[in-house]
Every structure is written in structure tokens, then in C-alpha cells.
Amino acid sequence: MSVTAGLHHVEMVMGTAVSIDVLDADDPELIDDLVRWFHRVDAVFSPYRADSVVSRIGLGDLAEAVAGAGDMVAEVLDVLHACEEMKRLTDGVFDPWAVQAPTGGRFDPSGYVKGWSVESAAARLEARGCRRFSINAGGDIVVRGRGVDDGAWRVGIRHPHHSQALAAVVGLVGPLAIATSGSYERGAHVVDPRDGLTANSIASATVIGPSLAEADAFATTLYVMGLDGLAWLSLQEGYTGCVITHDLQMLSTDAFDAHLVA
Amino acid sequence: MSRPIDPLLDPRRNPRTPSGSARPAARHSGQGRALPPPLPPSGATARPTGAAGASPRVPQRPAGKRKGPARGSKIASLAVSISTTLGLAALFAQQDTTSAAATDPLLDTTATGVTPTSAAVTAGTTSPATVVTLDPASTGSTVAPTPTTAAASGGIVDGTYLGTPSTNKWGTVQVQAVYSGGSLVDVQILSYPDRDRKSVAINQRSLPSMINDAISIQSSDVAHISGATYTWKSYKVSLQSAIDAARSASGLA
């Protein structure tokens, strides 16, 4: 066993890289448990797999799909319920049922599931006594406790024009989550369900808040709403955010600025 | 859908110290702060002194961290006090990013905006007029300060411009816009439907457009990058990958 406590692992799953840092534990089984969790989520919720529960739900096979979810039935029901709640909270801007899924169905909850699965993974670590860790799933991140050297976790926000540079740096002390939705993302043709048009009024939207499941969905919503979304976001208890325009103006709420360290 | 509203004249209009005279301090959240008012567009000669000093808010951004392009110094501060429900959404019109003359990217630059009461045009000012729009989709009306000939020729006379109260399904909305140096420096929501009243301050700053001026990932010592979405393939060559490798190699320290 290494003298240095801590676990670090990067897993390719859910179509992206999931990076796990645990500062206050060194039992590899913790990582194994999370890896199994993420692959299970991928199998059940992937919109890219025709045989996934989500794909079958999208094809109108709700009852049978849920029944076939096996040990993930509770999770499937949780996600379905949460997606309905997100649709309500966002005035229909976040609507997994308005998305054309890759396999042809009409249900793609990916915008919620990634954050939710990371949040669930964090709960698994906490249940095993971990208090200081971070999980980064393709740029959507949860942090718990403090980072290295007992400081805040320093998280950069990608510069919308330069993939190798940052627009800002925030310092986060857990429990917090941060998610960014940007026009530079792959498959960034985010459609506003309200009018069917592609949202493109801003370059990126970042949301910080207590839950990555919601922060992820809210970042997508803020991206669709554009500048107007900041006022909407301010109504969501505990959540703050910023938007970056195409001509590089960064607009943010005061509460968001409290996190800025650079 | 959106109907133009009559122009309003604000009795409090004060061309000399626009941002100080009309700000209803009580409407701002206590922590309301923002960056200095924008500088006038290049070539402008009529920037009123005291506009910055009149602001009760103090810039707190670390100076030098965010050197923007020349235009970047024209940071508008928009402290917006609102009380609202979900319909509020639209404090700002979508910006016209294609307009080279847009000094207030926050706001639409079409010329149907605030009308000065006089025909005078601030010397050298090239700033376009500004529209403060309440999203027609959600409010059913538009707060439309009046069209102006000054706007057509590219100038807004300094001062505070009061928008006509506009009624939507939640109640009445009224805003006012403050211009200084030909640029919009403040938009204030004077009234909003009295439901879930709360204040929101929205700050604005310019990001560096050149990569050399942007924050370096290497020097900023970040553990993660939000918004850096990686596919399996791209992760192999990504900076997050390098960060992860470095953290792993150093035992996370």
C-alpha cells in the first residue's frame, strides 16, 4: 500500500471519461464499486443502446421496459420522476421527452442521468465513510469536503473559444457540484423544446449548486434560455451560475462570483 | 405580440451624473457590486467624469487577471433588482453579436430604444441605441423605450430613461435605463409583480479573446475543468487527462 493515502481512477464509461479522486481513503474496492455502478447505469440508461431500458421506454414500451430493469427498477422510476420534475422546474425547457434519441425513440434523459449517476456515486462513497473526494464525468463535477492541502477544490471553467484555456477558476468546498453546457460540445445542437429551434444565443452556461443531477439539467436549461436564464436560475434555491456570450462577455450572479478565485 | 409603448420622459434625467442620481439604492441587494461603468466607445469625447465615482458599487475583480481587449474595459454593470416568478426570465434582449458597434453586448442594438428628450447627440458617441425588452413570449408586451433619430445616427444622450409601465399576466413591470458616455451603464427594474420578491445582481465582465491573455490551465493549478466534454478518443490527448495523470503520479498531492 502506498504511503500516500488516496485513490485515483479514470474510467471510460457513459461515452466519456469519469475521473474519481478520493483523498481520505485507499481501499481499491471503493473504486471497483463505483466502476460497476457507472457501467450498470450505462447499460440501463444509455440512449445509444437499442436494448437499454431508456431506449425501450422511448419506443413506447414503458411498462415492459420498467419491468425489465431488474435490480435497477427503483433507479429507473426515480429518474423518470425526476425528469418530470425537471421539466416542470424549467418550464419545459428541459424536456427528455422532446428529444429524438439516437435509437429513434422519444425519450433521452442523458442530460439528467449523467449528473444523477455521479451524485449517486458520491452518495455511495459517503456511505462508506469518504468525506473528501471529487468525481468528474466529462466536465460535470461533484466535490465533497476540501481538496488537496485543505483548500477549496479548484475547478476551471473552459474558455468557449480555446479548449486549452480557462474562462475563470472557481474554488469549491463540498458538498457542491458544477456543470457547464456549451456550444462547443459534441452534439451541441441543443433544441429548445418550446419552439423546436436550436439554442445558440450564448457560448456556454455554467451552474453551481448542491446537486449535480439538477446542476447538469439547469446548465442545459440556462444554455437554452441564454441571458434571460440568469434571472430564472436565481429563483432556484441554492443554485448560481454564469453565462458566456459569443463575444466573450461573462455574466454572472453575485452568488456565483463568490466562488471565483481567478 | 409585442406592442410598442409610448416613450417616457424621466423627470429625474440628469445628463451629468446619470448613474448616481437615479439609482434606487434600496432596490439593490446589499451585496450588489459590479464592475466599473463602460468607457465610451473609442473616439468618444464626452464621457462624463464622475460616472464611475457615482457608483455605490465597488469593483472587486482582481485587476489584471482579466485583461480584456480594448472593448473589454467597457464593462457594463447591470444591477437588476427584480421580484418575479418564473415568467420573469427576460430582463435582457438577446444581444446582437454581429454588430461591431455594440458596446453593450448584453442588449439588443436595434434602434427602437430609449429616446432622449432632446435631439442633441453626444459628440463623438457611436454607441447604438438600446432596447430593454421583456420577453414577449413570457410577458406579452415589450418595454420599449422610444425610437429616436439620435439612435439612428448612433448616439444616445446621457441620462436616465424611464420605461413605460408594462402590464403582463403577473402584474406591472417598469424599468429604467441609465446611459453614460453614450453607453448603457445600468438597467434598473423599478417595479415587478409583487410575488416572491427578491433581488438579483447580475455582473458583467469581458473575457480575454486571445489565448495568451486567457487563464492558463497549467498555471491555475486546477483539479478539474468544467465544460471540457471529452469523448473516449479525445480524452487521450486532453488536458484533463494530463491533470489526472499528474495528480495520480503525485499521489493526488
Image (cartoon, coloured by chain):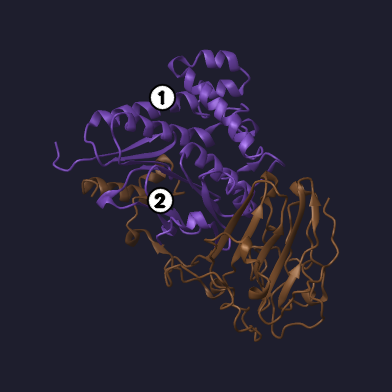
**How many numbered discs, if any?**
2
Kindly state the secondary structure of the residue where label 2 is placed: strand
Q: Amino acid at mark 2?
A: Ile
* Residue at left offset 50%, top offset 14%: A68
Chain letter behind tag 2:
B
Which residue is at the front of the view, B173 or A163? B173
Q: Is residue B62 visible?
A: yes
* Residue at left offset 44%, top offset 27%: A41
Q: Amino acid at mark 1?
A: Arg
Q: Is residue B141 visible?
A: no
Residue B82, position in %: x, y?
65, 55
State whether residue B238 is above or below residue A38: below
Spatial separation of the CA atoms under disc 2 and disc 1:
25 Å
State whether residue B110 is above or below residue B13: above
Residue pointed to by mark 2: B225
Chain given the colour purple: A
**Number of other residues with Cα within 10 Å of mark 2, as a class: few under 14, some 14 to 19, many 20 or more:** many
* Residue at left offset 41%, top offset 24%: A40
Chain given the colour brown: B
Which residue is at the front of the view, B141 or A65? B141
Residue pointed to by mark 1: A40
Residue B189, position in %: x, y?
69, 60
Labels 2 and 1 positioned on one and the same chain: no
**Number of other residues with Cα within 10 Å of mark 1, as a class: few under 14, some 14 to 19, many 20 or more:** some
Kindly state the secondary structure of the residue where label 1 is placed: helix
